Amino acid sequence: MSYDIQLYRTETKDREKNAGDENFFDHEDNLEPFTEEQYNYLKDRILKYDYILKEEKNRDLRFAHPEYNIFALLTDGGLYFTSGFDQDSIFEAGMTASELTDTDEFAKYDPQNNGWEEF
């Protein structure tokens, strides 16, 4: 079992809210791709949070956090955090995803906690 949190472009959030499709995320073409600048920005930010790049396959980057039970996957369409169910790892993954929304270009989606994070 794992706890999952995703980060998408705000355009994906708007599209999902208007779609009314419970299978929206099953279709990759629904995800607004990151620009090259956004992709590199997220990669750099993840590394600054002490994540270690473990694997690079095409444009899929897999990271692991050395202190918590957290893995992250950066793709062209999303940044996906997967953590164990220990509270420290869930908290850290959630906080990292929330902090990455500070530019208003990105939106955090937590399927275990009512979906989109709203302020």
Image (tube, rainbow, N blue to C red):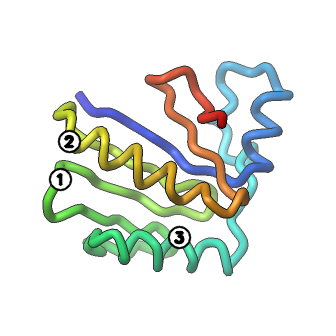
Mark 2 and mark 1: span between their CA atoms?
Answer: 7 Å
Packing grade of label 2 (10 A; few <14, some 14-19, many >=20) is some
Q: Which residue, given by chain and number where applicable, does mark 1 sit on?
A: 68
The image shows a total of numbered marks equal to 3
Contact check, label 2 and label 1, Cβ < 8 Å: yes
Relative side of 16 to 44, left or right: right
Name the residue type under label 1. Answer: Tyr
The residue located at (64%, 47%) in the rendering is 107
Task: Identify the disc placed on residue 47.
Answer: none
Sequence-first tag of 1 and 3: 3
Instruction: Give coordinates of residue 97: x percent, y percent.
Output: 47, 51
Q: Which residue, given by chain and number where applicable, does mark 2 sit on?
A: 88
Name the residue type under label 2. Answer: Asp
Task: Say which of 9 and 58 sits in front.
Answer: 9
Query: If the image is split into quadrants, where does the N terminus sit?
Result: top left
Instruction: Give coordinates of residue 90: x percent, y percent.
Output: 29, 39
Label 2 vs label 1, nearer the camera: 2
Sequence-first tag of 2 and 1: 1
Contact check, label 2 and label 3, Cβ < 8 Å: no
Mark 1 and mark 3: span between their CA atoms?
Answer: 19 Å
Q: Which residue, given by chain and number where applicable, does mark 3 sit on?
A: 42
Q: Is residue 105 above or below residue 16?
A: below
Sequence-first tag of 2 and 3: 3
Mark 2 and mark 3: span between their CA atoms?
Answer: 22 Å
